[in-house]
Image: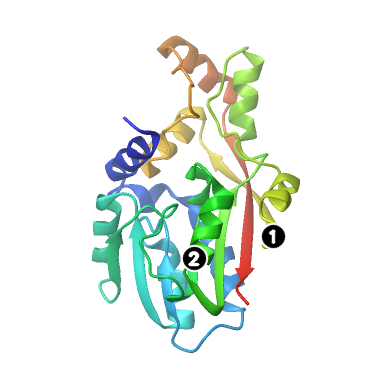
Amino acid sequence: MSRKRKVADAFALAAATYDQAAEAQIRAARHLADLVAALPLAAAPDVVEVGCGTGLLTRLLKPAIGGNWLLTDLSPAMVAAAAAAIPDADHRVMDGEHPDLAPHSADLIVSNLAAQWFLDLPQAVERLAACLRPGGVLAFSTLAYGSLREWQAAHARLGLEDGVGPFPSLDALHVMLPDCRLTSQVFTVNHADGAAFLAALRAIGATVAAEGHRPLSPGSLRKVIKAMGAPAEVSYHVVHAVLSRE
């Protein structure tokens, strides 16, 4: 099974529980929505959300900027959840890394914490930018180095591989995305303990490990959970990127 299919299947299983566990995603979406709403956008823009999930970002941004919306996701179950939550939009199953969109058809393309799942972020950004009209904007967020570092540290103390990322540093993203304006958002999310953190990951569908990672044995996983401590604080470094098409 391809990695993309694994990711789509994992998120499909989480469609009913996503919103209740998506604290980090909600905080990133609020930041991105505020950033986009402050931009000079076309009146009544044609907007595409990539990796819409249950529609968190659209629900925050659509009332602020209006327009005609197309919500897309790799997971059919997530598209169905978004359609139920936001019926006054169009919806489509689509791989955001290979957008099924006409060239120069969108005024705004947005995406919240989906880009870290892309296999080739620079190529994906280039393809998405090609779908923008002149004056259009691509705005997205992704996870960067430092995210989930407490989970990684708990593994490292035990000599175990963590299966996270790898997430690029801010400097690396500047090199990868030279046409984008990048800003950082750093915050922590508190969980009762390591088990609660793992449960939250499962509830949002973020369960596909890095390519080649071998799952831990149940005993090793219990040791990592204990090493996380209680309460368990988990860090996120979110990078928000904005590209404007001339």
In terms of depth relative to the viewer, which is nearer, 99 or 37? 99
Amino acid at dot 2: Val
Q: Indicate the position of residue 189 as horizontal and vertical percent values.
A: 57, 45
Name the residue located 51 percent from the left edge and 22 percent from the top edge: 225
Question: What is the quadrant of the N terminus in the image?
Answer: top left
In the shown orientation, is residue 95 left or right of residue 127? Answer: left
Residue at the disc numbered 2: 110
Q: Which mark is residue 182?
A: 1
The image shows residue 26 at horizontal and vertical percentages of 49, 57
First-in-chain label (2 vs 1): 2
Query: In the image, is residue 171 above or below residue 33?
Result: above
Residue in the image at 58% along x and 25% along y: 228
Could you tell me how far apart the alpha carbons at marks 2 and 1 are, in whole angstroms? 14 Å
- Callout 1: helix, strand or loop? strand
- All told, the count of numbered labels is 2
**Considering only vertical position in the picture, is 45 above or below 20?**
below
Instruction: Name the secondary structure under disc 2.
Output: strand
CA neighbours of label 1 inside 10 A, class few (<14), some (14 to 19), many (20+):
some
Residue 44 in view (yes/no): yes
Residue 193 position, x and y percent, is 52, 31
Amino acid type indicated by mark 1: Leu
Judge by depth and name the residue closer to the eye, 215 or 226.
Answer: 215
For the residues bearing labels 2 and 1, Cβ distance under 8 angstroms: no
Residue at 30 percent of width and 74 percent of height: 89
| Frontmost residue, 182 versus 132 | 132
Q: Is residue 210 above or below residue 127?
A: above
Quadrant containing the C terminus in the rendered view: bottom right
Residue shown at 76% from the left, 47% from the top: 171
- Does 29 sit left or right of 241 as displayed? left
Please say if 89 is above or below 207: below
Q: Give the x, y percent position of residue 83.
A: 26, 65
